[in-house]
Amino acid sequence: MTSPLAAVVLCAGKGTRMNSDRAKVLHPILGRPLAWYPITSAFELGAQQVVAVVGHQGDEVKKQLAANFPGQALQYAVQAQQRGTGDAVAAARGALTGFNGAVLILYGDVPLLTVDTLKRLVAAYNPAKGALAMISCRLSDPTGYGRVLRGADRKVVGIVEQKDATHEQKLIDEVNAGIYVVESKFLWGALEKLTPQNAQGELYLTDIVAQAAKAGEVAVVEAPPAETAGVNDRAELADRAEVIRARINTRHMRAGVTLQHPASTFIDAAVEIGPETVIGPQVSIRGECEIGANVTIDQGAVLMHTTVGDGAHVKPYSVLEEAQVGPKCHVGPFARLRPGTVLEEDVHVGNFVETKKARLRKGTKAGHLTYLGDADVGAGSNIGAGTITCNYDGVNKHETVIGSNVFIGSDTQLVAPVRVGDGAFVAAGSTITEDVPNGALALSRTPQTTKEGWAERRRKVLEGLKE
């Protein structure tokens, strides 16, 4: 395509059938708002300007879209009143002042249209022959859709809506998808000529097709009906999400990732995964996750906004949120890494271990039943089962610092703020309230009392009571 390309994405509708306080285009599919998908397609297609037309909850729509397109020149226009699709496109004219070229018109609630189909549409657009190219599809039951009208020469002459169609026109199975590429000068002039032909006083974008047919030839590209399907309610949202989920999973598998059970695997759109990684069934990877190469993520694990280094192993039913897991680490099973957790290389965090705002340095091990919150643990240290960093005094959080090559015995409480020096030992069952110097042994226990023969004497007493 030699002429410049801009895109207008209609995101102004309320979506009454969603029965929601949230604008329809903000309902999420795999970690992204619904409108993210067509807007992303427009950018991938090479549109020089992309304008989102907002209306219902416009400020919130702009806020969330801006957060999802950082650093990209997404523009906004406002449709003040809901006066139809023609009026919505006309609202974008100010944002495209000075633009001369082709305008692609998309919808914020149509997420399945592929870039390949849009490329075919753009390729079919030829301003030397006509000002408009459109997408149609064929349905076995076209009830409710606008029919594509063709003349005796099979050229498009216009669109007729279901309510206005004759009996013969209702038998037409080719329907209008509402996706167009239009020459900008023609578009703005055609929109000015639209008049409301309905009780709602709405301006229908479909009326520009007849205008384009009178001025030249309308190019048509057929697309699979599934690609042009919109979202009107939550059931349709779930159906579209299932298609996108399958596409995402297929893309990763073709890039060298093994999904042991794709049908139960949920991977958000923003996730990046390296080759030779193996992902088990019932795994959910959400948000801005980056998974390295040769990683294993076992059944039931949940990862959110987390990075996992090459060769790491996340074992079954572990939950990782806003964490950084280094290369060759082992996490779980049943571990929980909370926000601010950093595991450096070759760290082992075992079953029922919880971390929060904790850095575990290279080679550290915390194998079982441990809580490490607001902690910095040095390289090569071993944290025994049942260890707790007592980080909260009821008002403030305090840090526990454990040096390198430290041995913390089982069932230890470290009452922060406290430091344990390099190479130190803390005996099992200790409560540590003071700093421990390098190489020292810290021991805090009640002396053990052993009474020989006590068990036998107790048994005899109990037997006597029974008699």
Image: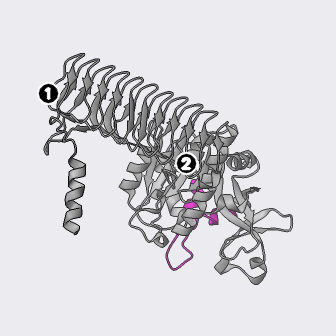
The quadrant of the image that shows the N terminus is top right
Q: Is residue 196 magenta?
A: yes
Q: Nearer the viewer, residue 66 or 426?
A: 426
Q: Is residue 383 magenta?
A: no
Residue at point 41%, 26% (across, down): 344
Query: Does residue 68 show up?
Result: yes
Residue at point 25%, 29% (across, down): 427
Q: Secondary structure at mark 2?
A: loop
Q: Nearer the viewer, residue 336 or 198?
A: 336
Q: Are marks 2 and 1 in contact (CB under 8 Å)?
A: no
Q: Is residue 434 above or below residue 13?
A: above
User: What residue is pinned by disc 1?
Assistant: 434
State which quadrant residue 388 falls in.
top left
Q: Nearer the viewer, residue 98 or 353?
A: 353
For label 1, the crowd category at 10 Å Cα-Cα, with few meaning under 14, some 14 to 19 and many 20 or more, is some
Q: Position of residue 369 (x, y in %)?
A: 35, 42
Say whether residue 81 is left or right of residue 136.
Answer: left
- The residue range painted magenta reads 187-211
Q: Is residue 418 above or below residue 165?
A: above
Q: Is residue 249 above or below residue 150?
A: above
- Check the image and name the residue furthest to the top: 439
Mark 2 vs mark 1: which is more N-terminal? 2
User: What residue is pinned by disc 2?
Assistant: 299
- How far apart are labels 2 and 1 at the CA level? 42 Å
Q: Amino acid at mark 2?
A: Gln
Residue at point 38%, 22% (across, down): 380
Residue at point 25%, 16% (across, down): 439
Q: Position of residue 287 (x, y in %)?
A: 47, 45
Q: Position of residue 38 (x, y in %)?
A: 57, 51
